[in-house]
Amino acid sequence: MGKKPKNLWLADPREVLRASEGFDLATVDRNSSPGWDGGKKEAKALMKSRAALLPELQERLFAEGRTGGKRSVLCIIQGLDTAGKGGIVRHVMGAVDPQGVALSSFGVPTEEEAKHHYLWRIRKALPPAGSIGVFDRSHYEDVLVVRVNDLVPEEKWSKRYDEINKFEEDLVKDGTTVLKFAMMVSHEEQGLRLMERLDRSDKHWKYNTGDLTTRAKWQEYQTAYQAVFEKTSTDHAPWYVLPADHKWFPRLAITEILTRTLSEMDLNWPKPRWSVETQRRKLAESMSTESLITSLEETHDNVESAMADSIEVRHEVAAIPGIDDAQAAEVAAARKEAWLEEIDAAVAQKETILRDRADLPKKLKKKLKKKAKG
């Protein structure tokens, strides 16, 4: 099963990185990795382990949404140019099935968007039930860029903090878990990353001459972000402030927070509203005896393969926060027993159906009858 990587988080990153009351952005060391007692190598190892958990957790959420569930997750990612927002999409969300991810990017409003309330385009992009939504920039641009560039009067943008809090509170009440990440790069590191874009021809497309205009307003943006954290880091939708001079750290932190959040949602495969036995019997009636024999022979392999991939059975269950090795063993044993019962039930029903088939090979018919008696 492989060696379980060390979890070097000294505490839950949601507590360490949260912008709580009294938070001061000016004191954040952008070159640090708060709460993590390791380096890049150890971070990659833990992320690989989490990448083995995330796909199934996300698929369970997706399956729940497809069967009437209302829950979803929204990851809001904010940060100045070069903070590494695109890397989060590639390295974190790249680990899950794209069909269950709703990615939206918000730049300068289009002509159509500008005609509506600033939350209009945000509402249109909200993730459907069962999905993980990712906002690359978001409605917070309307209290960041708008404020710094004086695009609307202060009287107008200053009211938006309360509007945003109410908007996000309603989202949570409707079943959306809101995760807000602010990737904070230092002024020095931003300069180095912008220079790299100028030095590399393959990065020229990422560079915008307006980046220097934004950079010249660095302190104004820091002040605007401080106000965002003070006014909109709420119990229902807190901000997590991620030092971003090391690109690997925000990726690690977001991966960990997303994994813990999904794990705590207690996601299970939906129970069918129809009878498995009835549907199996009806399907068998449409199958040739030869195909049904093949299905019988493959039953163990099919179910055991699913069992091996199950979070509860494989070793990664012990990596889920809050579950130690002893608990993991108990969970695995219980789930294995349930899987084995399902195998036995499927095999028994198929054998019963096959015994009544007139064209069943004599040797197999004799074997099944003998098994039924004994």
Image (cartoon, rainbow, N blue to C red):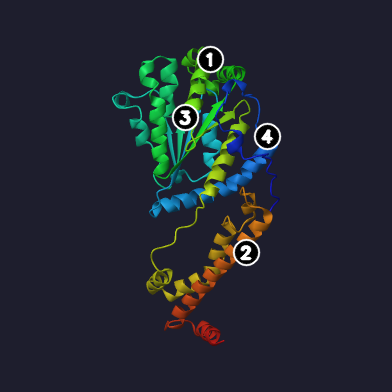
Instruction: Say if mark 2 contacts mark 4, CB within 8 Å.
Output: no
- Quadrant location, the C terminus: bottom right
Q: SS at mark 1?
A: helix
C-alpha span from label 1 to label 3: 20 Å
248 horizontally vs 67: left or right: right
Query: Residue 230 at x, y = what percent?
Result: 50, 26
Residue marked by disc 4: 40
**What amino acid is labelled 4 in the image?**
Lys
Residue at x 52%, y 47% (from the top left corner): 262
Instruction: Say if mark 1 contacts mark 3, CB within 8 Å.
Output: no
Residue sitting nearer the eye, 158 or 129:
158
C-alpha span from label 2 to label 4: 35 Å
Circle nearer the N terminus (2, 3):
3
Mark nearer the viewer, 1 or 4: 1
Residue at x 47%, y 50% (from the top left corner): 61
Residue marked by disc 2: 333
**What amino acid is labelled 3 in the image?**
Thr
The picture quadrant where one finds residue 247 is top right
Residue marked by disc 3: 232
C-alpha span from label 1 to label 4: 30 Å
Residue at x 50%, y 31% (from the top left corner): 233
Residue marked by disc 1: 219
**What amino acid is labelled 2 in the image?**
Ala
